[in-house]
Amino acid sequence: MATRNVRIALGIAALVVAGGAFAQAQVYRYTDADGHTVYSDRPPSSEVKNLQTKKLGANFISTSEPGYAASLAAERYPVTLYTFQCGEVCQNAETLLNKRGVPFTIVNVSEPDGQTRLQAVASEGVAPVLTVGDKQVAKGFNEARWQAMLDEAGYPKTPAPKRAAPTARVSEPPPPVQEGTKAVGMPPRGGDYPK
């Protein structure tokens, strides 16, 4: 019975620690009793001066590039959508590709060059037409058929997740140097961290 309680306590402690790891970090900036500017992730004692707290957000890289699976599939089986302003059907066709994060080329069949390209792919002049690679052609919008073609080509079912853009760092002017204190500057670029 005692070992079961210990296991439960350890499990709860692990959950608390894991939950804390996902919380936003907080940084404290203050002037200590000797007049030095200190940056720390631990709360300072009550006798510090000029206490400032800052929350640091997540550090993600934002990209508009498709994911690896979509890039690989696009290289092997490029997607082309032959369409024109046909209303809801053509909008649904384009929306399907965008929801899956499929990189594709649009050919406007209302232009003479687009009409010629469509005739080379599909003998009837019906749009929208989807080509996946050089072998698969779907005439008319049929969501189930289009989904199956994209699955077969290896396109992911959902786009790569968008990441939050990194927050801008605003540099603050250094605090004024008080008489009898030593200013602590930033380390030189490319140099070692100050000892």
Image (cartoon, helix red, strand yellow):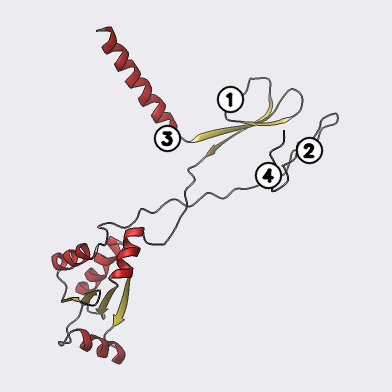
Mark-to-mark CA distance, 4 and 1 = 21 Å
Mark-to-mark CA distance, 1 and 3 = 19 Å
User: Disc 2 marks which residue?
Assistant: 176
User: Disc 1 marks which residue?
Assistant: 43
Give the amino acid type for the residue marked by disc 2 in the picture. Answer: Pro
Quadrant into which the C terminus falls? top right
Q: Which residue is drawn at 68% across and 44% down?
A: 172
Mark-to-mark CA distance, 4 and 2 = 12 Å
Mark-to-mark CA distance, 3 and 2 = 36 Å
Give the amino acid type for the residue marked by disc 3 in the picture. Answer: Phe
Give the amino acid type for the residue marked by disc 1 in the picture. Answer: Pro
Mark 3 residue element: loop
User: Disc 4 marks which residue?
Assistant: 172
Front-lying residue, 180 or 185: 185
Asked if one can make out residue 102 in the rendered structure from this viewpoint, the answer is: no
Mark 1 residue element: loop
Mark 4 residue element: loop
Mark-to-mark CA distance, 1 and 2 = 23 Å
- 116 relative position to 145: left or right: right
Few, some or many residues within 10 Å of mark 1 (<14, 14–19, 20+): few
**Can you give x and y, in whole percent of width and height, for residue 135 in the image?**
20, 76
Q: Which residue is drawn at 69% across and 41% down?
A: 192
Few, some or many residues within 10 Å of mark 3 (<14, 14–19, 20+): few
Few, some or many residues within 10 Å of mark 4 (<14, 14–19, 20+): few
- 70 relative position to 195: left or right: left
Closer to the chain start, of discs 4 and 1, is 1
Closer to the chain start, of discs 3 and 2, is 3
